[in-house]
């Protein structure tokens, strides 16, 4: 039987790669993004050779009503087997100069969004008696604070790691597993913006910053979105059904714990 998964922030970057890999592996994917056009385009490109009927939906992850609407609709029509909370934002600035408005926005999307969507998904799974799986996208910045100019992002991703454990503990009685992935230097449009920001803050070039990231990675290359997506696919597979509360480092060795 085809299983259905909702992926947030799936219009581009890591989220789109997750949707793509899961579709190839037979999942029926609901591509969600606040940018509905991006979600539609990503959905149209998905493999459907296993007979899946992929869908797309506009979703503001920090809006509880919006998240519950999507979760309940999918659960009632298709069956909600899994949810991947991947949507996230970043903004680089020195800690002393970071506007509180930017801090609030980062936590609204990166942490509140994971809470809101996780709660909505879990409620729908419990209501429909589904033994589900939830995966949250954290970061290696959720395991160490030695990350320049990303104090708000670090705070949000540390929160995701802790929230993943709290969710896993409470949802275990409902046979819902919850894990997260912690990517490193992933080559995405968001990373391109970070290269320019960090170069400006450091007084160097984007090419120089990129090389420093590669040098920090023992496997010797920038991470690709597909590297993350394949680990997410594992966490949603039957092979991972006795794993919960874990935050898996997927960073080429850039940070080991």
Image (cartoon, rainbow, N blue to C red):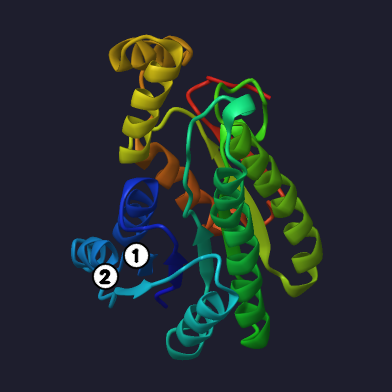
Q: Quadrant of residue 43?
A: bottom left
Badge 2 vs badge 1, beta-carbon distance below 8 Å: yes
The C terminus sits in image quarter: top right
Compared to residue 144, the image places residue 167 above or below, namely below
From the viewer's perspective, tell me whether residue 69 is left or right of residue 207.
Answer: right
- Residue tagged 2: 50
Badge 2 density bin: few <14, some 14–19, many ≥20, Cα 10 Å:
few
Residue 254 point in image, percent of width and height: 53, 19
Residue 72 point in image, percent of width and height: 53, 85
What residue lies at 62% left-to-right and 43% top-to-bottom?
100
Residue 31 point in image, percent of width and height: 35, 67
Compared to residue 101, the image places residue 30 above or below, namely below
Instruction: Give SS at disc 1.
Output: loop
| Residue 157 appears in the figure | yes
- Residue tagged 1: 26
| Residue 239 appears in the figure | no
What residue lies at 35% left-to-right and 41% top-to-bottom?
226
Badge 1 density bin: few <14, some 14–19, many ≥20, Cα 10 Å:
some
């Amino acid at each position: 039987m085809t299983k259905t998964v909702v992926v947030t922030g799936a219009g581009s970057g890591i989220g789109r790669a997750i949707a793509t890999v899961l579709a190839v592996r037979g999942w029926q994917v609901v591509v969600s993004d606040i940018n509905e056009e991006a979600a539609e385009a990503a959905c149209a490109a998905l493999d459907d050779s296993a007979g899946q009927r992929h869908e797309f939906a506009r979703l503001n992850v920090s809006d509880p009503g919006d998240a519950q609407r999507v979760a309940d609709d999918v659960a009632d029509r298709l069956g909600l087997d899994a949810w991947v909370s991947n949507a996230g934002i970043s903004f680089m600035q020195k800690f002393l100069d970071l506007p509180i408005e930017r801090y609030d926005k980062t936590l609204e999307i990166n942490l509140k969004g994971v809470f809101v969507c996780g709660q909505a998904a879990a409620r729908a799974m419990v209501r429909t008696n589904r033994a589900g799986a939830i995966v949250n996208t954290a970061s290696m910045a959720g395991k160490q604070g030695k990350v320049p100019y990303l104090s708000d992002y670090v705070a949000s991703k540390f929160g995701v790691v802790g929230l993943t454990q709290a969710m896993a503990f409470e949802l275990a009685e409902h046979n819902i597993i919850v894990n997260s992935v912690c990517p490193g230097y992933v080559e995405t449009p968001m990373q391109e913006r970070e290269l320019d920001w960090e170069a400006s803050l450091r007084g160097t070039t984007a090419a120089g910053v990129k090389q420093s990231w590669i040098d920090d990675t023992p496997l010797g290359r920038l991470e690709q979105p597909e590297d993350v997506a394949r680990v997410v696919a594992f966490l949603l597979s039957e092979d991972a059904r006795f794993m919960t509360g874990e935050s898996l480092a997927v960073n080429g060795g850039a940070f080991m714990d």
